[in-house]
């Protein structure tokens, strides 16, 4: 985070800072009763289209590791909660640096509320407004009791004679949060229910229908989006 602050100070030399000054590598708030953390605005623009933007540092979250030696509860009291980066890579975050999470290029923030020295329960969450769910594990923008909800796309075949179908359990899945089933290739929702779902079962782990009645699906191929907790 210090590198970001130094970049900001260097970039905005000559600009009037109304809320912050740099002192010995630490930020000192000159106006503690103001809401603004950093004011980089200026009224010196010569034209109306002379806009300015903030360029965030690029980070590869598939190899990024936290420096935990600094987490003494004083200098970094938030244990990196709220840290923002622009991620450039696709893959999983590094084990031991919070909850291992699948990431794709885009803005992420580290969600680690209530901690001062521990990052183990923290997780990188996407800042994008939309979640692109693929056949790989995808973190959604939903949490249940601070537990991240993940999603994955898949396909199953119905025989037309049995209620049992195969919907594999993703690695680490502890419970199902929801499922949406589509007619293959149509994009039309067929169902948002299953009669039952069994974790870890290799074949026939799901039974089609609603919570009150099992139903034989017409023979064919169906797409699904499975949402789950780990």
Image (cartoon, helix red, strand yellow):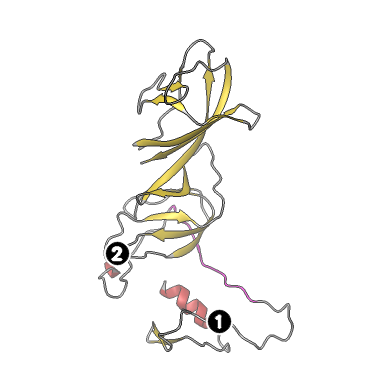
Residue at left 49%, top 17%? 215
Q: Is residue 153 left or right of residue 113?
A: right
Residue at left 56%, top 80%? 11
Q: Is residue 208 left or right of residue 175?
A: right
Q: Nearer the viewer, residue 160 or 9?
A: 160
Residue at left 41%, top 34%? 170
From the top left corner, tell me how far across and down residue 185 is, in percent: 65, 28
| Label 2: element kind | helix
The C terminus: image quadrant = top left
Q: Is 55 within the magenta?
A: yes
From the top left corner, tell me how far across and down residue 158 is, in percent: 53, 17
From the top left corner, tell me how far across and down residue 184 is, in percent: 61, 26
Q: Is residue 118 left or right of residue 140?
A: left
Asked if residue 170 shows in the view, the reply is yes
Q: Is residue 161 left or right of residue 148?
A: right
Which residue is under mark 2? Answer: 68
Which residue is under mark 1? Answer: 40
From the top left corner, tell me how far across and down residue 135 is, in percent: 52, 36
Q: Taking 53 as reference, is 64 above or below it?
A: above
Q: Taking 188 as reference, is 205 above or below it?
A: above
Q: Taking 141 as reference, is 228 above or below it?
A: above
The N terminus: image quadrant = bottom left
Q: Is 214 within the magenta?
A: no
Magenta residues, start to end: 52-62
Asked if residue 137 shows in the view, the reply is no
């Amino acid at each position: 985070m210090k590198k970001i602050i130094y970049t900001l100070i260097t970039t905005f030399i000559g600009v009037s800072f109304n809320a912050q000054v740099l002192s010995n590598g630490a930020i000192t708030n000159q106006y503690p009763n103001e809401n603004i953390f950093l004011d980089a605005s200026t009224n010196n623009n010569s034209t109306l289209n002379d806009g300015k933007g903030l360029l965030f540092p690029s980070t590869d979250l598939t190899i990024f590791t936290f420096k935990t030696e600094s987490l003494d509860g004083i200098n970094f009291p938030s244990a990196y909660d709220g840290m923002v980066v622009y991620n450039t890579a696709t893959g999983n975050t590094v084990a031991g640096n919070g909850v291992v999470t699948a990431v794709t290029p885009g803005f992420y923030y580290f969600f680690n509320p209530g901690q001062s020295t521990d990052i183990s329960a923290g997780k990188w969450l996407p800042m994008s407004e939309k979640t692109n769910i693929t056949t790989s594990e995808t973190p959604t923008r939903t949490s249940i009791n601070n537990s991240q909800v993940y999603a994955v796309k898949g396909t199953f075949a119905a025989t037309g004679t049995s209620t049992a179908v195969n919907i594999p359990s993703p690695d680490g899945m502890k419970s199902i949060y929801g499922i949406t089933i589509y007619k293959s290739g149509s994009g039309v929702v067929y169902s948002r229910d299953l009669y039952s779902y069994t974790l870890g079962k290799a074949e026939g782990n799901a039974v089609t229908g609603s919570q009150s009645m099992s139903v034989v699906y017409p023979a064919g191929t169906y797409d699904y989006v499975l949402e789950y907790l780990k």
